[in-house]
Amino acid sequence: MNAAELILLAAIWGASFLFMRLGAPEWGPIALIALRVSIATLILLPVVRQPGALRSVLKNAIPLLVIGVTNSAVPFSLFAYSTLFLSAGFSSILNATTPLWGALIGYLWLGTPLTRLQAIGLLTGITGVTMLVWEKIDGSTSNTLLAVLAGLLAGALYGFAANYLKKYLHGMPSRLIAFGSQFFAALALWPLALLTWPSQPVSIQAWIAVVMLGVICTGLAYTLYFRLMENAGITYAMSVTFLVPVFGTLWSVCFLGESISVGMLIDSLVILFGIALTSGKINRFTLRRFSSAP
């Protein structure tokens, strides 16, 4: 059951980069994301009708605000900005750096130990990211560089939020975290959204994109994500980032006609191998068994 939910979540979040690519040019990054998290809040609203739910959300308002800002409002906006200048597939690969940031922040902040293989994986992943970024920004415009940095910062914020949630919201029902984080993300974004609201009417395509982002890619997706954290653990839930670039690239190729270079593919594999080591998906036993296979 956990595996099926993980694959479904990856497919949904991979599609979010497609919808941001379609919606951001007309809405603008902040207005698009303000609508995204507001729609998600409405979708998740029934959860607070359960006994004690609203009291629990209010009691944990500050941690939920932090999660809402660092796991939704700011990183969503950063990725929406990045899709203005980067392909949806490339942005989804930047999203895959989340476990690397999560491991590094956990080690520096919470003192979460890293084995030798995990440390090697962290360095391998960072090397892959450097290769990927260098290939993209070499000879590119300043807008491209800023878009790449925005994607990397978004991944770092996801990594921080996962560790913060583990420390301050451990044991809180996933459905309430999903609702509370989107509600406070919406509160944080709307003042800026009103200042950057589109001056021209947006197309039907842009409306469809924002509705899909809110209902499917946020409301449903965050319910699945926090439930995976609750049922299978933070490491398992964050491993969704292994699959997000696969679906993100697949959807962008199928529906946007984007392409992926050989260098981009190689860099992505290096990053994913580093993540596999860092998250413990590949360990000494796995390597020993692989090396001794006939």
Image (cartoon, rainbow, N blue to C red):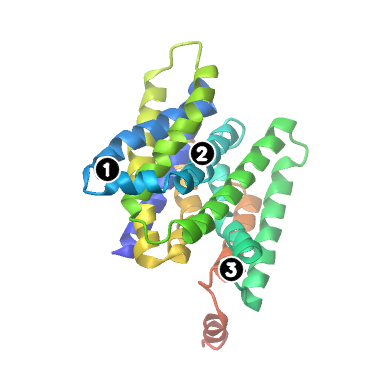
Could you tell whether 275 is left or right of 207 in the image? right
Labels 2 & 1 near each other (Cβ < 8 A): no
Looking at the image, tell me whether mark 3 or mark 1 is earlier in sequence order: 1
Secondary structure at numbered mark 3? helix
Q: In this view, does 42 lie above or below 112?
A: above
Mark 3 is surrounded, within 10 Å at the Cα level, by few (under 14), some (14 to 19) or many (20 or more) other residues, namely: many
* Location of mark 3 (residue): 278
Q: In this view, does 269 lie above or below 33?
A: below
The mark closer to the camera, 2 or 1, is 1
Residue found 69% across the figure and 31% down from its top: 143
* Location of mark 1 (residue): 48
Count of residue discs: 3
* Location of mark 2 (residue): 76
- The kind of residue tagged 2 is Phe
Picture quarter with the N terminus: bottom left
Residue 91 at x, y = what percent? 56, 43
Secondary structure at numbered mark 2? helix
Secondary structure at numbered mark 1? helix
Residue found 61% across the figure and 57% down from its top: 101
Q: Name the foreground residue: 157 vs 201.
A: 157
